[in-house]
Structure formats: structure tokens, C-alpha cells
Image (spheres, rainbow, N blue to C red):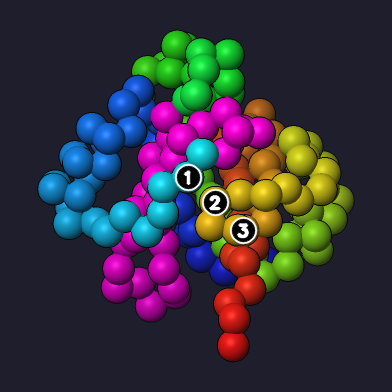
């Protein structure tokens, strides 16, 4: 069901500073920067090259306001790993299969995510305290 680790989401207070840190330290390439108003974040996707399983990313997340999920996370825990995103081939099928195991679904239906992907979150209390995101990449043209 899971095809790869799609990304690791990292909460940060200053997106520009975090981008500079990750690009200069690791040589990562910024693939996209966007605002996701429904999720209350400005985000950057930085590509990690060379994986035989496909492209993976570091996702840097800066809250738009303190009352957003990432804003509350920063207030409670400070900067750091916010969630892990796993690639899936069919997000609707994956949600049904995972939900059938008893894991609570934060999103019962996919929603819009970074770079046009369909995403859904799973409840961290049912997964060892790890907020988990499922990601079905936007279909490529061709």
C-alpha cells in the first residue's frame, strides 16, 4: 500500500531562514513554494535526489497565524519534525484499507496538498504519536 516516504514535514518559524539552512547544509533544491490557506501554512518543498524509489522531499512549514495546526505545534513543541508523509498509488483505497484496521482518519476524504497532490492525515494517537500523511501525487502529463 505505501510506495515510499514522500516527505518529512518540518515546522519552522521563518521559512526563508529554514530554506537557506537546508539548501546550504544539504544542497537541496527548492521545488516549490506555495501558500496553503486552508491548512494555514506557507510551505516549501525541497527535493532530495537519488532515491531509487522516486523523489522524496523535505517540506518546510511556516504557519500563517498562531491559531493554525502548525502554529499551535510550534507554540507547544518548537521547531522540528511535524509529520511524515507516505506515497500511495490510490489514496481513496488506502484510506478505506487503513480505516478498516481501526486507525482513525483525520481526513475521511482526500484534500488538496502540495504541488497538486491529494492528501489525507491519519490520527497520531493511533500511530505511536506520529502524525501521518498519505500522499497521492498529481498525475504527470504525458
Which residue position holds label 2? 114
Between 126 and 113, which is closer to the camera in this rendering?
113
First along the sequence among labels 3 and 1: 1
Could you tell me which residue is drawn at 38 percent across and 78 percent down?
52
State the residue in front, 60 or 106: 60
Image quarter in which the C terminus is found: bottom right
- Quarter holding the N terminus is bottom right
Q: Are marks 2 and 3 in contact (CB under 8 Å)?
A: yes
Residue 52 is covered by the magenta coloring: yes
Q: Position of residue 69 (x, y in %)?
A: 58, 23
Specify the quadrant of the image occupied by residue 27: bottom left
Label 2–label 1 contact, CB within 8 A: yes
Where residue 117 sits: x, y (%)?
62, 58
Indicate which disc residue 17 carries: none
Residue to which mark 1 is pinned: 34
Q: Residue at x 57, y 68 (%)?
A: 3
Q: Earlier in the sequence, mark 2 or mark 1?
A: 1
Q: Nearer the viewer, mark 3 or mark 1?
A: 1
> Over which residues does the magenta segment extend?
36-62
Which secondary structure lies at badge 2?
Answer: helix
- Taking 117 as reference, is 33 above or below it? above
Q: Residues within 10 Å of mark 3 (few under 14, many from 20)?
A: some
Left or right, residue 54 beside residue 14: right
Label 2 environment density (alpha carbons within 10 Å; few <14, some 14–19, many ≥20): some
Residue 81 visible somewhere in the drawing: no
Query: SS at mark 3?
Result: loop
Location of mark 3 (residue): 117
In the picture provided, is 11 more to the left or to the right than 130? left
- Residue found 31% across the figure and 26% down from its top: 14
Task: Examine the rendered structure and indicate whether residue 65 appears above or below residue 103.
Answer: above
Amino acid at each position: 500500500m505505501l510506495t515510499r516516504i514522500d516527505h518529512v514535514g518540518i515546522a519552522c518559524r521563518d521559512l526563508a531562514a529554514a530554506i537557506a539552512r537546508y539548501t546550504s547544509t544539504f544542497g537541496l533544491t527548492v521545488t516549490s513554494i506555495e501558500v496553503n490557506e486552508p491548512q494555514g501554512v506557507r510551505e516549501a518543498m525541497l527535493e532530495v535526489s537519488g532515491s531509487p524509489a522516486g523523489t522524496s522531499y523535505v517540506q518546510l512549514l511556516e504557519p500563517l497565524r498562531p491559531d493554525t495546526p502548525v502554529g499551535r505545534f510550534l507554540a507547544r513543541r518548537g521547531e522540528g519534525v511535524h509529520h511524515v508523509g507516505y506515497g500511495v498509488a490510490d489514496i481513496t483505497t488506502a484510506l478505506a484499507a487503513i480505516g478498516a484496521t481501526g486507525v482513525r482518519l483525520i481526513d475521511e476524504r482526500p484534500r488538496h496538498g502540495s504541488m497538486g497532490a491529494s492528501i489525507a492525515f491519519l490520527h497520531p494517537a493511533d500511530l505511536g504519536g506520529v502524525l501521518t500523511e498519505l500522499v497521492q501525487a498529481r498525475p504527470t502529463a504525458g
